[in-house]
Image (tube, coloured by chain):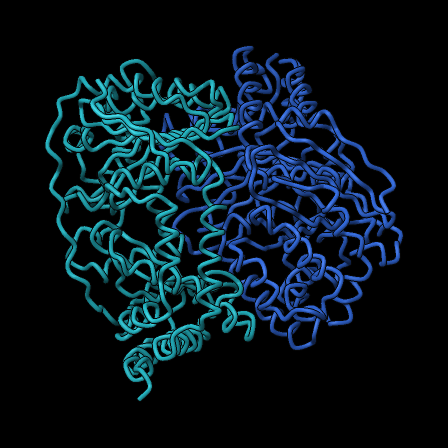
Chain colours: A blue, B cyan
Amino acid sequence: MARQQHAEAAGAHLGGTIRRTVLASGLRVVSEDVPGSSTFSVGFFVGVGSRHESEHLHGASHFLEHVLFKGTRRRGPEEISAAIEQVGGDLNAYTAKEHTCFYARVLAEDAPVACEVITDMLTASLVRADDLESEREVILEEIAMHADEPGEVAADLVAERLFAGHPLARSVIGSRASIGAITREQVVGFWKRHYRPSSLVVAAAGRVDHDALVGQLSVFDQLPPQPAARVQQAPSRRHESGVGVVRRPTEQCTVSMAFPGFSTFDDRRYPLGLLAAVLGGGMSSRLFVEVRERRGLAYTIDAAETAWSDAGLFSVDWQCARERVEQIAGLVRDELAAVARNGISPDELARAKSQLRGQTVLGYEGPGARMSRLGTAELVGDTRTIAELLDRYDAVTGEQVTALARELFGSAPYLAVVGPAPDRRRLQALLRGWGSAAAPAA
Amino acid sequence: MARQQHAEAAGAHLGGTIRRTVLASGLRVVSEDVPGSSTFSVGFFVGVGSRHESEHLHGASHFLEHVLFKGTRRRGPEEISAAIEQVGGDLNAYTAKEHTCFYARVLAEDAPVACEVITDMLTASLVRADDLESEREVILEEIAMHADEPGEVAADLVAERLFAGHPLARSVIGSRASIGAITREQVVGFWKRHYRPSSLVVAAAGRVDHDALVGQLSVFDQLPPQPAARVQQAPSRRHESGVGVVRRPTEQCTVSMAFPGFSTFDDRRYPLGLLAAVLGGGMSSRLFVEVRERRGLAYTIDAAETAWSDAGLFSVDWQCARERVEQIAGLVRDELAAVARNGISPDELARAKSQLRGQTVLGYEGPGARMSRLGTAELVGDTRTIAELLDRYDAVTGEQVTALARELFGSAPYLAVVGPAPDRRRLQALLRGWGSAAAPAA
């Protein structure tokens, strides 16, 4: 059954033993046995998300994820969750642009139950018409909930503009129209087409018996292996500038200033990660100090980068009163221009590296985080260990950070504002003046 | 310096060694050294929160918490956070109704830095007038953010009505008026009055050197011990019924159906915890199954209890379209009436106990959760170990759960709705019919 299996000595950097197995069906299993752990976290990662949907199937991945909780040949919907919850565990799922994940966390002795229940959902769900209709209503409620969350609305608007014309531009959740129109046949077809063993990664961490885990997954060998679905490539990086406003009668505006970033394997992500830390990675970061500490203009402000297999973005995000949007946007522009012009100090660079190293070790303390990293990395064929990633960050020079900042901030960003509408003209004028403010000093 | 010190063998139930020390100043130190851990979580818990504020100082605890990040005799505001962030750690704080907590999480070798920085903030802050003004602006932004979060608004409304006339009724964050009016002298006075060693608990978990930790805290011995501040007792449990609506132009309504609950040490919290699990503790719970699984009326619904030192509450919470508020409220009423009339099955009781046990072990896996439990329990003199709590839950009978449900649900609840206003009269009619629906069968 197992055609490849090896222990990874490099797993030692975080204390666990990492093992990887590829089944005859193509299903990949990767696990980390963490000494001293008494719990078991497992995730079934399927390589399908909103970017793989055609326009009339917008939201199908997420709809399907919901429907797979509604009952199998063996279990009613209540029995699915009850099987995990009655041992005190959690069972849940999420859908992203490039993958869907079903996950559970249980005491180590309940590992077989967790794996069996998720396997059952993924392979033997009934997708009854009644259940589908009831779940359609739930998703319409979720769409309404989503519309009430300004941060989600701003993120959708940014994706819509930075990836215009490409499936990455569409939201994960779908629209009222698309969710209203999707049929049972389409959902089942989507499931059969995309939930193939060769697109599936099972990742586990905590107290893990790797061989027993692999043995439990043999049921997937019975499914016919199918070729991978085609993926539409993202358009090349573009500088979509401008101001987008979604009016909401809220007290505050939620603002996202976004720049096109880099894809998962792009080496520029190393200087970008350090730049994001210096600019907006915590309470001692440049933007937090300028906007909140020195001026008290906002409760918080941060900067972060996101990467997909062939595209990415970098954004600075904050919430503030309507009358402060322009002032803060101006301060952010000046700060980004300053870093593009003058770079960062050796001391800032050293602190950012130390910060990233500590955050990484702290961030992977729990089995859930380790499982998640193992699964998402395996899914896209990312074989870099965390130790390797940290070494790459350590090797970044100040010049590389400056060069990256010039490339990234040389053109005006896209500014998404959700809330009581600010003065759009003044914001547009601010963006028009971008080039001169961000230009390197003569 | 240390006048009492002992190792608690009972710490073994979760794998760590718990030690407790009371310093001459009255400051209590409690720690759990977790084998295999390489991180250190520490929290400084001060026994003061919004319930200790007089009306004109509404929000002072939270304002003070913010201001203590603004600089000490030794450090500027950026140096406070930078000291922790440059080693990759987190430093933050929160304020609740009964306590304020400053906490950090770092790699184990950075434990001394984390403790020293927080000690510096709590004992040597400057509270400069300029910084106070800038932070006042930040809190006004936070109040606006809070007003945009329907769940927070609903929770405030529930507290306002269930604890009317008592400081527990007031929000933690304060009002625009109270925050606008508080002076520097008041903030400093509040700090000096409430941040006394005898009101302070330092809790740590992870890789902890207890003796070194105690040694680091000797600076608090220099502060004069002072008597504890008086606490106004909560009014006796009352059945405040009715419908409260805060209009918000959101897509969904956020609803909280609330009943008066029990204080921290009330033994009825054991059956209440099991009842909350059966009714709304996950996807296999009665309310989730009735409202979402069977009918698709809401994305989620849950039930939870909260306890303070002399009062508590139990609430069922959900979000839904305006036109479904009444239907869901009716379903919830019927389900609560059914449990008051017929109790829960032996199988449900057994599953709830197993669920609570598993959740507890899983919930205390990380050092952060252990630190938090140690600190909050020590602060109120709760000496029960987690193993003892689980034993108490295990001993609950079905009859006790039924009796509790009858007591709790015998009178109509308070219903808080935030969002597009539903038909208030129909909701009031639903509450008026409560008694007959919830009455035990003849």
Q: Foreground residue, A15 or A267? A: A15
Above-or-below relation of B86 to A202: above
Quadrant of the frame with the C terminus of chain B: bottom left
Above-or-below relation of B77 to A183: above
Q: Could you tell whether A180 is left or right of A354 in the image? A: right
Residue A218: x and y in percent read 80, 53
Q: Foreground residue, A145 or A411? A: A145
**Corner quadrant of residue A327:** top left
Q: As drawn, which residue projects farthest toward the front?
A: B9
Q: Foreground residue, B433 or A71? A: A71
Residue B119: x and y in percent read 30, 22
Quadrant of the frame with the N terminus of chain B: top left
Residue B212: x and y in percent read 35, 17
Above-or-below relation of A128 to A84: below
Residue A3: x and y in percent read 87, 41
**Corner quadrant of residue A179:** bottom right
Q: Could you tell whether B133 is left or right of B401 in the image? A: left
Q: Could you tell whether B34 is left or right of A197 in the image? A: left
The residue located at (53%, 53%) in the rendering is: A246
Q: Foreground residue, A205 or A390? A: A205
The residue located at (56%, 37%) in the rendering is: A37
Count of all numbered marks drawn on residues in the image: 0
Q: Is residue A171 visible?
A: no
